[in-house]
Amino acid sequence: MKSNPILFSLFGSDHFAKRMHQQLGYEMGNITLHQFPDEETVINIKSLVNDKDVIMIADLTNPNGKILPLLFAAETARELGAKKIGLIAPYLVYMRQDKRFQPGDSITSHYFAKLITNYFDGLMTIDPHLHRWHDLNDIYYIPAIALHATKPIATWIKANVPDALLIGPDAESSQWVSSIAQRINAPFLILEKQRKGDNLVEITIPKIDLYQNHTPILVDDIISTAATMIKTVTHLKSLHMKPSICIGVHALFAGDAYENLQKSGVKQIITCNTIAHASNAIDVTNLMIEAMDDLFKT
Ligand code: R5P
């Protein structure tokens, strides 16, 4: 009989790991990452991993200080005899640098994928930023599962907003906005966005007179500086629409982004719990639990 994988939580992912342990009965692994005064890291895996499949669930936000320890953790498990090692990153970092924007730029999404591919045998994530890459397997040469938060988001909207008008702030967002709208039978609009700088985004909004009685719900995969959301909210306000609700899958909220978005006149800010944040109201743990059997499948 195939034995259950052993689950290790890294960088504050214990809430996910505990739910997986409770619902799937997977053993919770014991791992410590100790940082020396010189900021080098030593990994210690106390649990027996020999001949077992290992799953590491990791919050990789603010990735640069986490990546080496993550790779060392995988390598330690490998040396201690782990059979297969899977990575669950509810938010997959380094997906947005997906082309050479300026001559000489790095394409870090590709380099990061190469690193992960070298150390892990399977990857699971939720709504990765697939824009110029169309599929995770364009860059990840291991079984890679991209789950979608559309169903739990649709459930939240249906339960909370009877007069929803879904708004996708740019062309990329149409993939999940149209799918959510279809699930709850609500109208949707996709706007045109032009980024003029890190914090400057220009929005073009089509005629929305037809929807004056609706509550605009902006849905995007990532809220980072919140410039995209703020611009859209402000424009909708100028069109005398009802106050907007902003829904993001991944609550990155760099710097003062959350406070700035709150001040922009939104009715509510809601996010999925892929990244722990005060705005989390949509739980995506079950998405990962339901897909767990597929983690190492090709
Ligand atoms: C971009 O293509 C993404 O889908 C988001 O629209 C973007 O990352 C949001 O970034 P910000 O919050 O900085 O406007």
Image (cartoon, rainbow, N blue to C red):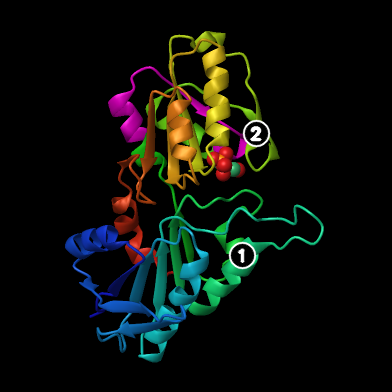
Q: Which residue is mark 2?
A: 201
218 or 81: nearer the viewer: 218
Q: Residue at x 49, y 64 (%)?
A: 144
* Amino acid type at image mark 2: Val
Q: Position of residue 103 (x, y in %)?
A: 82, 57
Q: Which range is magenta?
A: 154-173
Q: Position of residue 99 (x, y in %)?
A: 71, 55
- The answer to whether residue 216 is visible is yes
Q: Is residue 191 left or right of residue 146?
A: right
- Queried on whether the Cβ of the residue with tag 2 lies below 8 angstroms from ligand 1, the answer reads yes
127 or 76: nearer the viewer: 76
Q: Which residue is at the far front?
A: 37
Find numbered disc 2 in the image and state the secondary structure of the residue it sits on. Answer: strand
Q: Which residue is mark 1?
A: 139
Cα distance between the residues tagged 1 and 2: 28 Å
Q: Is residue 132 left or right of residue 297?
A: right
Quadrant for the N terminus in the image: bottom left
Q: Position of residue 185 (x, y in %)?
A: 41, 24
Q: Nearer the viewer, mark 1 or mark 2?
A: 2
